[in-house]
Image (cartoon, coloured by chain):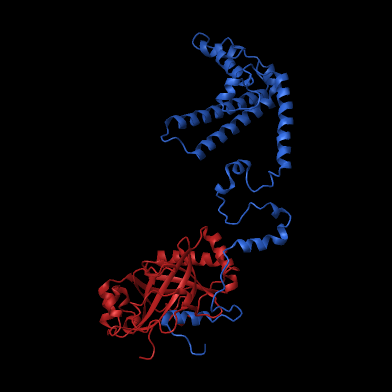
Amino acid sequence: MALPPEQIRALDQLRQRLSQLSQSLASARADLERSDPVPSWPTLQRDAELLVHNLNRYHETMNEHRAFLTAAHAYPLPTFPGPSQEHVLAQLMRKKLEPKAEDWIAASTKPKTRDAAQLNGLQNGDTSRDVRLDREEYRDLWKWAGATSSGIANGMMINDAFEDNYTLAEREAGVENVVTGLKRNLDDDSDDEDEDGEGDEKMQEAMPSKPAEPGVDASRPPIALETLLRFTSTGTLPPQR
Amino acid sequence: MHEFLLYSQIPVTRHEQVLHILAGVCAAQPISVCEQHLIYQQLKVADAAGSKKGAPAKHQSAQAQRQSYHKLVREVSAGDGEQGAWRFRAEDVPQPGVQAVISRPVEERLLDQAELEKFREGGSWYRYINQFITSTQRFVHNNVIVRVSRILSVPEGTGALEPLDAPPLVLADCRPVDPSGSYLFEAYVRVEDGTNSKLTEQAMSELMALKSQLEGAVDLRVPDRLSLDTRVKGV
């Protein structure tokens, strides 16, 4: 009658994982419901990470004891207080999932229909048909999508769109309006080849060219910092200048 | 007010580069400021200096007992000759014993018309000595202000009549004081209360942080303290 200890341990482990998972779900839910204003992004992310982590551990445990768990059957002992705990008993003895859970599984495993895709804001190529996609149609879709997208990408490669300093959208809207923060003229098709040689000169050209300054002779040694500071403090320069 | 300063000199060939480096460090482009500085020598001190200075903390310092050079500073715009109001600026001798930076009390305030009269020719308070123009690129990094300026001397005879009423200077006529055209690099933090050690410590640490950040690009150093001496000698 009694289960071997490792199986009991497996059940115990599973129970622990489930209780952790349900706890973190409950606390995340409570956070969302109660806190005002809505929790910050980092908090939500941390909650979600915790949930995923707990789900993963639950999943691992399930996988680890898969053989035992699929073979296991629940049956009530005569000592089980059936009349008073009828609800629990019914749940334990149930072989099928609850109708709610079944609906939920069906809804989330079926392929996206047009409505669902639109709800999610997805607009991929083949959503015009409002029938559910079967395996065959998926294959067609991917076959078509792969070829088409690589065709588009090839076209962009040929046009040097990837090498361009502006996106296609920016080109269409007019390059003049793009705020790059740079004053240098980027729209220069010839600068690909001579990047090394001429690049520096171009930079210098684009910089505000300084007019030759009168009274400046860069070849002369600078006067000492102290002398300069003495001048700014007292207004006099040493005579040996 | 109290200032903590570090200095450096930038040769004209490196000026552009240093401006670019600073723009990167400060994540902002510089502001161009052009200022005219008139240097005046005090003719009277004692009570007069005390009442003028307004900051009671300075009365005890030796500075107040001696005649000093004070400055009038105003912004001038290079293009249209527009001029700001005159500001009075008195720099104390840098404190001895502070090795890492230049540390000095400074007084700076706007002058009203009545006070300005004291600086006019023939008054018994001040004598005009000289003037210079600073053409500055100013950056701000945290609480550190960085000024990269060229100090320009005015054409001969500019201040001969009445420097306060002189017509706007033509910047094109001004020549760099340093014939090599090098730029003066000042990094400084200003603290309202120089006796608040928490503030001064933070000011010092921010200045030193900038110094170590700029190491290799701009080597900031402490000049001879007495080169910033503003006391009048030989009186």
Can see residue B225?
no
Q: Position of residue A105 (x, y in %)?
A: 60, 19
Q: Nearer the viewer, residue B36 or A231?
A: B36
Chain ID, blue in image: A
Q: Residue A221 appears at what percent x and percent y?
A: 59, 81
Where does the N terminus of chain A fall, quadrant-wise? top right
Coordinates of residue A6 in the picture (x, y in percent)? 68, 25
Q: Is residue A62 left or right of residue A22?
A: right
Position of A69 relative to B32 (above/below): above
Please determine whether, in this image, residue A96 is positioned above or below residue A48: above
Where does the image place residue B37, in percent across and percent down from the top left? 40, 76
Say if residue B169 shows up in the picture.
yes
Name the quadrant containing residue B18. bottom right
Which chain did the image draw in red? B
Residue in front for this viewpoint, A224 or A220: A220
Q: Residue furthest bottom?
A: B234
Q: Quadrant of residue B127?
A: bottom left
Q: Which one is in front, B125 or A23?
A: B125
Give the total number of marks visible in the rendering.
Answer: 0
Q: Is residue B196 above or below residue A140?
A: below
At x 47%, y 71%, the residue is: B135
Q: Nearer the viewer, residue B133 or A84?
A: B133
